Image: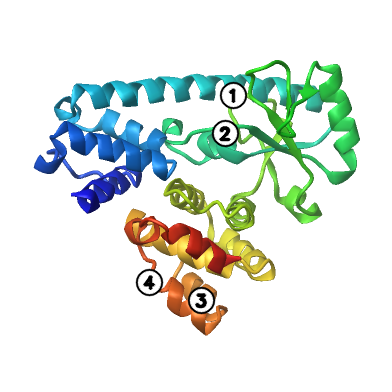
Amino acid sequence: MSDLVSKFVLNQVAQKGGQNVLPEELLAPEAWVRALEFAASVHALVPFARAVELAPWLDEVPHAARLVMRAERDRQARLFREARVEAERASAVLVAAEVPVILEGGLALALRFYPDPAFRGVDLLRFRIPADRHFDAKRALGLGGYRMHAEGGLSREAGAPAVKLSGAGGGAEWDRSVSGAFRGFSGELRALSAADALVDHLRFAVRERALDSPVWVNDAHFIASMLEASDWEVAASRISSERLQAAAWTLLGIARNERGTDVPSGFLDAMRRELGLFRKWRLSRIGSDESLFAPGEARGITRLMA
């Protein structure tokens, strides 16, 4: 039963669709307790709740489970609205101070790459600025009423979304960044190119040992879906130079297998050829959400990607 429940959750998170009838095993309230616990354990309650909300069999879901998911959806919708408002306000402060700024992180992914932003949760706001403009950025935000808090971000008041500044990346990434990618925001707020967004995503997963959720595969899928042929060439070059081949092969391989992501022929083979024999053998066993997010699996796999 537990395997069936976890597979059901992962299929919903991957938005596979095609399931017009709720499996009989999922009609029992206790099955939904396990489903919600598993979704929360892999940090995927937001996309799971959204997928269930849109399913044709929603009325068959036990009432108590629907209440839990509706509460989570309402909470995330509020956080998303607050994050968007705060991003507009903070980026306007930085733009007025003539500080170049790129929006990154969950909000940028949801707004730019996801067809339905409600499938992507958001937390703190990440802004990338040139390394030599950090003082100017902090000064401008300070004059705008932002104060540093314990987690290292800046916010206007307790409970408001926090803004985190990063100076990562070189000049080429700024040159490839694009303006006008976020509707409703100042045209001066920039976004990473799709190729750099993919590399940034892979780097963050490895650096933070954060490959603990199928949401990471969703992100890779939606970013990759926007890459043109020339973008794949840029991404391949950067992935090799930053030694992210293992992360690329694993995440994009699962995305292709489980979500139908259109990855160019030869790209995954090129990533695989650059791996050592042990990592190649070990990672070759991981080809699906189910194999990666089995209990205890993701932590060991993430170590292999570093």
Q: Which residue lies furthest to the left in this view?
A: 24
Report which residue position mark 1 lands on.
Answer: 84
Identify the disc placed on residue 285.
Answer: 4
For the residue labelled by badge 4, is the local secondary structure a helix, a strand or a loop? loop
Which residue is depicted at the point 29% across and 20% down? 67
Can residue 262 be seen in the rendering of this structure? no
| Type of amino acid under label 3 | Arg
Report which residue position mark 3 lands on.
Answer: 279
Report which residue position mark 2 lands on.
Answer: 107
Q: Mark 1 near mark 2, Cβ–Cβ under 8 Å?
A: yes
| Type of amino acid under label 2 | Leu
Q: How far apart are marks 1 and 4 (CA)?
A: 39 Å
Front-most of residues 37 and 86? 37
For the residue labelled by badge 3, is the local secondary structure a helix, a strand or a loop? helix
Q: In this view, does 123 lie to the left or right of 131?
A: left
Location of residue 206 with respect to 165 vertically, above or below: below
Tell which circle, 3 or 1, labels the residue nearer the N-terminal end.
Answer: 1
